[in-house]
Image (spheres, grey):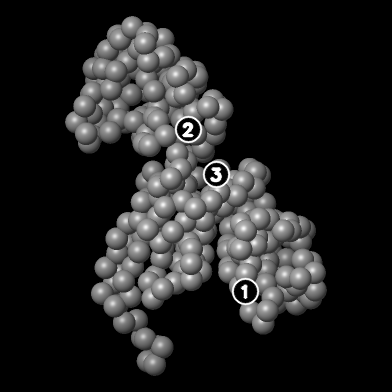
Amino acid sequence: DPRTGQVAGYGAVGPVLDLSVARGVVWGLVKMPIETALVRIDPATLVSSPVQLSGTPDWQIEDALAASDTSLWMFSQAYGKLYRLSFEGYLYDVIRLGQHPPVGPAGMAIGDRWLWLAAPWGNVVQVDTGNDQVVAEFSLHLPLSGISWAGDAAWATSLVGGKVVRIDPVAQAPSLEVAIGPTLLPTLMVTATPILRAHRPCPDAPYSRLEVGDLVRTLEEPALPQRLRKEAGKDAERVGWIQPGEVSRVLEGPACADGWVWWKVETLTGGYTGWAAEGDGTEYWLIPWK
């Protein structure tokens, strides 16, 4: 409560990565065991509800969130992409920025017609929200801690460098540096889901989340066993099953066939060994398991 400075209530949603406010609603990114959940929080009741991302085969691993009056924006370090979506979760557009080793956290801000991304690799990315085009990307030669909008300019913060940098949106360049304190020693940064790394071994298939040696678990719902094949491919001979919720170990792979990514697995309880598809463009059937 801003009048008293006291906490007025709590909404239980999980470990929060980022928050934004638009249309009288609080939008949050919440770190879950497998994916990053997008939640809608009613500020009056503190009741939260998940928002499912649709319109993309990408697995939901986001690191930063920003909201405007018309759209939600999410950034994924794992995929190196910016997503613009409706408040119902439908994907409007994807901006591919490429994958880079992170040196800091991700942060986003919206001001005037611009979306600003303090990218984990140390660059500032300026996006025109009118046409979803990147108009500038430049380095401040500092690991960034966040970015905000005030006074018709973007302000990038670097705790490592002990600086705040003003960025002119028209000149698309830094225009002022302000020292805010002593520099800090840089620390290794990770993305929202450090135990999982998305990669794309097959160009015509969804991203993969697995590596040889991983433990995987199959979906419990729907309660249908997953087929194991002698070779990678939908038409290969069936040699066994993975039961719903059963844990298996990845032995070989990946292999590409029929627009899917395939892994050779052994079930830990059923005694079967064979090739299983990781998932299609809608859902994943093999879930990383700890």
Please tell me the numbered disc located at residue 206. Answer: 2
Residue of label 1: 112
Residue at (72, 58) in percent of width and height: 135
Instruction: State which mark lies toward you, 2 or 3.
Output: 2
Question: Does 26 sit above or below residue 286?
Answer: below
Q: Earlier in the sequence, mark 2 or mark 1?
A: 1
Residue at (28, 33) in percent of width and height: 219
Q: Residues within 10 Å of mark 3 (few under 14, many from 20)?
A: many
Q: Would you say 163 lies left or right of 241 here?
A: right
Q: Is residue 174 visible?
A: no
Give the image location of residue 228, x and y in percent: 32, 15
Please tell me the numbered disc located at residue 78. Answer: 3
| SS state under label 2 | loop
Q: Would you say 92 lies left or right of 228 here?
A: right
Q: CA distance from mark 3 to mark 1?
A: 28 Å
Give the image location of residue 119, x and y in percent: 64, 56
- The amino acid beneath tag 2 is Pro
223 vs 195, nearest the viewer: 223
Q: CA distance from mark 2 to mark 3?
A: 14 Å
Q: Residues within 10 Å of mark 1 (few under 14, many from 20)?
A: few
Question: Does 70 sit above or below residue 62?
Answer: below
